[in-house]
Amino acid sequence: QVQLVESGGGLVQPGGSLRLSCAASGFTFSANTMAWYRQAPGKQRDLVARINSGGGTYYVDSVKGRFTISRDNAENTVYLQMNSLKPEDTAVYFCNVGPLEYDRTYWGQGTQVTVSS
């Protein structure tokens, strides 16, 4: 059974930092691309960053230079280090993996990030 459990969200002032974690289980973590998405109120869920099995990364333009995605295959965990946070980064952040067997994509429950003074 695939499980993705996010943690690390919270309230932070503009310019601050947060580190999100996503603990994964139920599949071969090291062999799969992992991704972080976010969804602001009233908006669609959008890709933020992803990291492939070889450690190659991709970031959307709005977070380049501020966010860093990384993975620990020994701990089956993917991280999102977020620096220089802006109010527009406020959203629920979701961990994602897929497609896995039977073409299924999986999501965590999400963690709220609020950037406000």
Image (cartoon, helix red, strand yellow):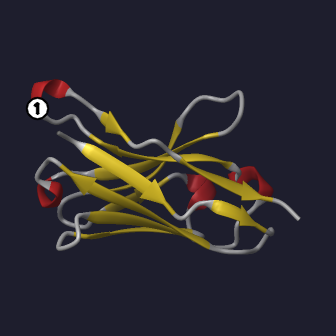
Q: Can you give x and y, in whole percent of width and height, for residue 30 in the image? A: 14, 61
Q: Is residue 34 above or below residue 47?
A: below
**Left or right of residue 14, residue 4 in this image:** left
Q: Can you give x and y, in whole percent of width and height, for residue 111 in the image? A: 55, 51
Q: How many discs mark residues in the rendered view?
A: 1
Residue named by callout 1: 101
Name the residue at 71% across, 51% down: 90
Name the residue at 17% across, 56% down: 29
Q: Quadrant of residue 45?
A: top right
**Left or right of residue 55, residue 40 in this image:** right
Of the pair 65 and 20, the residue shown nearer to us: 20
Q: Can you give x and y, in whole percent of width and height, for residue 48 in the image? A: 50, 50
Name the residue at 75% across, 61% down: 86
Q: Farthest right residue?
A: 117
Q: Farthest front residue?
A: 1
**Left or right of residue 1, residue 61 in this image:** right
Q: Quadrant for the N terminus, please.
A: top left
**Left or right of residue 64, residue 29 in this image:** left
- Disc 1 residue type (three-letter): Glu
Q: Quadrant of residue 52?
A: bottom left
Of the pair 96 and 64, the residue shown nearer to us: 96
Name the residue at 23% across, 71% down: 75
Q: Is residue 17 above or below residue 116?
A: below
Disc 1 crowd, CA 10 A, few/some/many (<14, 14-19, 20+): few
Q: Quadrant for the C terminus, please.
A: bottom right
Q: Can you give x and y, in whole percent of width and height, for residue 14 in the image? A: 80, 68
Please tell me whether mark 1 sits on a helix, a strand or a loop: helix
Q: Quadrant of residue 104?
A: top left
